[in-house]
Image (spheres, rainbow, N blue to C red):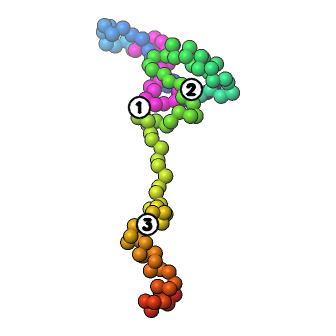
């Protein structure tokens, strides 16, 4: 299991109703800011059911909403699912499969017998 977060914010406790001065108070715990869509933990070489159970137990102790993702989960950007980019369409191949009248006449004009008839060589 790998942690993908770095706890780099020290949380110190001092009551809100105390007067200013005399420092921040005693150190209590470390924290980290986690943006939406950030992968927090990675688990490898484990059965999926065992990994889900372990991460379910961890999520009970962590604030926020957590989600289990794997390699088959579609990619997301924040909260939005990123749709796969469709393959580019080759319109020339599509025209050759089902030519319009204008394109069929153009193809016919490229045949050698019509080139010879119009006086063009090559």
Q: Is residue 27 rendered magenta in the image? A: yes
Given the current orientation, which residue lies at the most extreme right position? 45
**Label 1: which secondary element:** loop
| Disc 1 to disc 3: CB gap under 8 Å | no
Residue 111: % across, % down: 50, 81
Q: Is residue 109 above or below residue 118?
A: above
Q: Residue at x 45, y 63 (%)?
A: 98
Q: Disc 2 marks which residue? A: 41
**The image quarter in which residue 82 lies:** top left
1 vs 3, front mark: 3
Given the current orientation, which residue lies at the most extreme bottom position? 119
Residue 117: % across, % down: 45, 90
* Marks 3 and 2, the one that precedes in the sequence: 2
**Label 2: which secondary element:** strand
Total numbered labels placed on residues in the image: 3
**Residue range (magenta):** 24-41
Nearer to the camera, 120 or 105? 105
Q: Disc 1 marks which residue? A: 79
Nearer to the camera, 104 or 20? 104
Crowding at mark 1 (Cα within 10 Å: few <14, some 14-19, many 20+): few
Quadrant of the frame with the N terminus:
top right
**Label 3: which secondary element:** loop
Q: Disc 3 marks which residue? A: 99
Crowding at mark 2 (Cα within 10 Å: few <14, some 14-19, many 20+): few
Residue 44: % across, % down: 65, 28
**Marks 1 and 3, how far apart in space?**
43 Å
């Amino acid at each position: 299991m790998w942690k993908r977060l770095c706890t780099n914010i020290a949380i110190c406790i001092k009551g809100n109703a105390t007067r200013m001065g005399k420092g921040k108070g005693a150190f209590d715990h470390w924290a980290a800011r986690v943006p939406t869509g950030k992968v927090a933990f990675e688990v490898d070489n484990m059965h999926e059911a065992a990994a889900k159970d372990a991460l379910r137990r961890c999520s009970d102790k962590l604030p926020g909403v957590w989600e289990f993702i794997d390699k088959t989960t579609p990619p997301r950007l924040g909260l939005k699912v990123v749709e796969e980019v469709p393959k580019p369409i080759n319109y020339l191949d599509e025209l050759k499969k089902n030519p319009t009248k204008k394109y069929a006449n153009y193809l016919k004009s490229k045949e050698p017998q019509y080139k010879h008839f119009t006086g063009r060589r090559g």
